[in-house]
Image: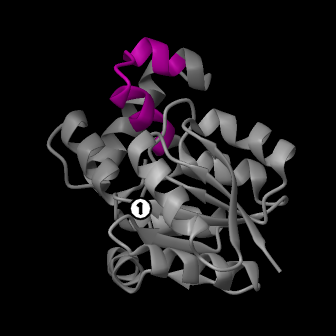
Amino acid sequence: MTTRVLLADDEHLIRGALAALLNLEDGIDVVAQVGRGDEVLAAVTEHRPDVAVLDIEMPGMDGLSAAEQISSQCKIVILTSLGRPGYLRRAMAAGVSGFLGKDASAEELAMAIRKVQAGGRYLDAELAAAAMAAGDSPLTERERDALRLAGDGATIARIAAELHLTEGTVRNYLSSAMTKLGAQNRLEAIRTAQRMGWL
């Protein structure tokens, strides 16, 4: 039985190399490739892959958000160069079955694809250990939303309007996030949260 695979990675050279290597593996057929996260759902609908291999950082939509959209339609493996602990937890919550770093060999990726297609899970041991050591995010959903918007350069007024909150409440959320993350200012809080994969 052949496993049909979709590859989603914004780096054309990496995506092409992965496709070529995976097509050399017995029982694996790369049926589609996309370079943007917001193209994943349409490609899954059109090509009906058994497994989608998604990069986390892509234009249009990140791989974790794309995973949430397609988790009922196929198995998902996240392939990332960003080993942030919070990403693994978010990936598992999004229905991802496999999670490994881009430094993995083609053989390891093929093994992960076969394992998740068979109903199992495949997790990079180092990423899993880092995620367990880091623990859960201390941030509430509203604190994350406020930090994410602040990281995009939004003013307090714009954050308040977008989240339907008062400016004072937004300041309280940002202050609380800074305290929880041990940050001296918003920028430091944003960087810490991003480094941990909590944003």
Identify the image quadrant of residue 51. Answer: bottom right
85 lies left or right of 18: left
In x, y percent, where is residue 59?
49, 32
Camera-side residue of 57 and 180: 57
Q: How is the protein colored in the picture?
A: one colour
- Residue underneath mark 1: 138
Camera-side residue of 88 and 143: 88
Q: Which range is magenta?
A: 144-160
Camera-side residue of 73 and 142: 73
Of all residues shown, which one is farthest toward the front? 24
Report crowding for label 1: few under 14, some 14 to 19, many 20 or more residues within 10 A (C-alpha).
few
Identify the image quadrant of residue 94. Answer: bottom right
Please, is residue 78 above or below residue 158 in the view?
below
Q: Quadrant of the N terminus?
A: bottom right
Residue 11 visible, this angle = no
In x, y percent, where is residue 113?
63, 75
Camera-side residue of 67 and 183: 67
**Which residue appears at 37% of the width and 64% of the height?**
102
**Which residue appears at 31% of the width and 39% of the height?**
175
In x, y percent, where is residue 176?
35, 46
**Which residue appears at 33% of the width and 51% of the height?**
193
**Which residue appears at 61% of the width and 70% of the height?**
92
Residue 124 visible, this angle = yes
Query: Element type at marker 1?
Result: loop
162 lies left or right of 191: right
Q: Amino acid at mark 1?
A: Pro
114 lies left or right of 150: right
Please, is residue 22 above or below residue 190 in the view?
below
Asked whether 125 falls inside the magenta stretch, the response is no
